[in-house]
Structures are given as structure tokens and as C-alpha cells.
Amino acid sequence: MNPDVQFLKVNYEEHKSMCYSLNVHVLPFFRFYRGAQGRLCSFSCTNATIKKFKDALAKHSSDRCSLGPTKGLEEKELLALAANKDLSFNYTPKPVHPAPEEILVPKEVPSGSSFRPKESEEKTLVGVGK
């Protein structure tokens, strides 16, 4: 009924450990992803709430554009899978860029003197550019 939608089925019994790492505890469970937007929504669904699934299909139909690199699982989900010893899944977290080095310098240094600030004197935080 939805030829533009790709459905992927995961066998819960064969992949319990992975499902547990991704917080999938109630079946059936659905996740909707779109290209650069990544995960749009996720929920469990029963026969009584099948309207929720149909509404999500209509809302997240493929007629809307999603430019940019494709996104899938979020960083915390990838880390949870990598931490699961039952899976052979490796993931290297994205590097975090450190803040520029910072040093303390006196606010004012009297010219022509051998002034050395005492520990209790006021100092200003200055960032060192790279």
C-alpha cells in the first residue's frame, strides 16, 4: 500500500539484546526515519492503536524532501549498542572539540615595575587563540 516507504523487520527473539539496548520492550514497535532528519518518531502500536501508525505513515510520507547526509540512530543509541557485550558492534564516538586554552593574567600591570600580583589580587580570564 506504501511503495515509497521501506519497511524493515527485526526478529525480536533473535535480536533481544539489541532491542533491549535500543529501549524496545513492547511489540509491535515502530520507528520512522527520513534521510537527513534521522528519527522522526517512534512508538509501540497495538490493534487498538493502529490509527496512530496510519497517521504517522501519512504525516511522514516520502513526498517531503530531506536534504543532507542520512541520519540513523542517535549517538546515545550507538553508544548503547557498542556497550552491549552480546553484540559484535563497534562504534567510535564523534570527537569533542576542546575549548581554547585559558590562562590568568593580571588586570593591570604597572609599567616599569617588577610588580607580581598576590594570589588574592583580582585577575582576568583571557583565552589564547590558536
Image (spheres, rainbow, N blue to C red):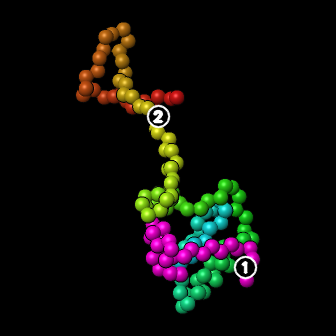
Q: Nearer the viewer, mark 2 or mark 1?
A: 1
Q: At which x and y percent is residue 108? A: 37, 21
Q: Residues within 10 Å of mark 1 (few under 14, many from 20)?
A: few
Of 24 and 11, nearer the camera is 11
Residue under the point 36% across and 8% down:
112
- Position of 80 compared to 123: left or right? right
For the residue marked with disc 2, what is the amino acid?
Pro
Q: At which x and y percent is residue 47? A: 55, 90
Of 90 and 79, nearer the camera is 90
Mark 1 lies on a secondary structure that is loop
Residue farthest top in this picture: 112
Q: Which residue is mark 1?
A: 2
Q: Main secondary structure of the magenta part?
A: loop
- Label 2 or label 1, whichever comes before in sequence order: 1
Depicted 112 relative to depicted 42: above or below: above
Report the disc number at residue 100.
2
Q: At which x and y percent is residue 44? A: 52, 80
Quarter of the image where one finds residue 67: bottom right
Q: Which span is picked out in magenta?
A: 1-28
For the residue marked with disc 1, what is the amino acid?
Asn
Which image quarter is the N terminus in?
bottom right
Depicted 52 relative to depicted 83: above or below: below
Mark 2 lies on a secondary structure that is loop
Decide whether residue 94 is among the magenta residues: no
Q: Residues within 10 Å of mark 2 (few under 14, many from 20)?
A: few
Of 130 and 68, nearer the camera is 68
Q: At which x and y percent is residue 43? A: 53, 77
Residue under the point 62% across and 68% down:
33
Depicted 101 relative to depicted 91: above or below: above
